[in-house]
Image (cartoon, rainbow, N blue to C red):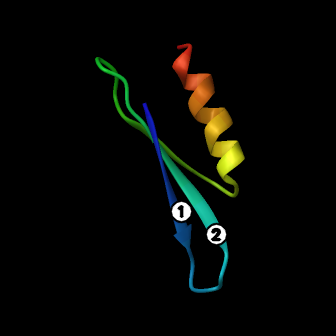
Amino acid sequence: MATFVKHTHKSGKVTWKCKARRKGFPTRTQRFDSKAEAQVWARSLRGR
């Protein structure tokens, strides 16, 4: 399961943080410039 969090910097730039959790595996976290990139990354982890 993945969780997406929108973060707006003081400069106005928006980034997305994705936290992917699977039972029996360590939590993986990564930041992206777009939500679509974060979703692709989360889907790629689903098959592993």
For the residues labelled 1 and 2, say whether their Cβ atoms are less than 8 Å apart. Answer: yes
From the top left corner, tell me how far across and down residue 30 is, in percent: 53, 46
User: What residue appears at the point 62 percent right and 24 percent down from the top-left corner?
Assistant: 44
**Residue at far left of view:** 24
Residue at image coords 58%, 57%: 16
Percent coordinates x, y for residue 42 in the rendering = 57, 33
- Label 1: which residue? 6
The percent coordinates of residue 2 (x first, y second) are: 46, 37
Q: Amino acid at mark 2?
A: Val
**Tag 2's secondary structure?**
strand
Q: For the residue marked with disc 1, what is the amino acid?
A: Lys
Determine whether 27 is above or below 8 in the image: above
43 lies above or below 8: above
Q: Secondary structure at mark 1?
A: strand
Residue for badge 2? 14
Image quadrant where one finds the N terminus: top left
How many marks are shown on the rendered structure?
2
In this rendering, the answer to whether 46 lies above or below 2 is above
Q: Is residue 10 left or right of residue 25?
A: right
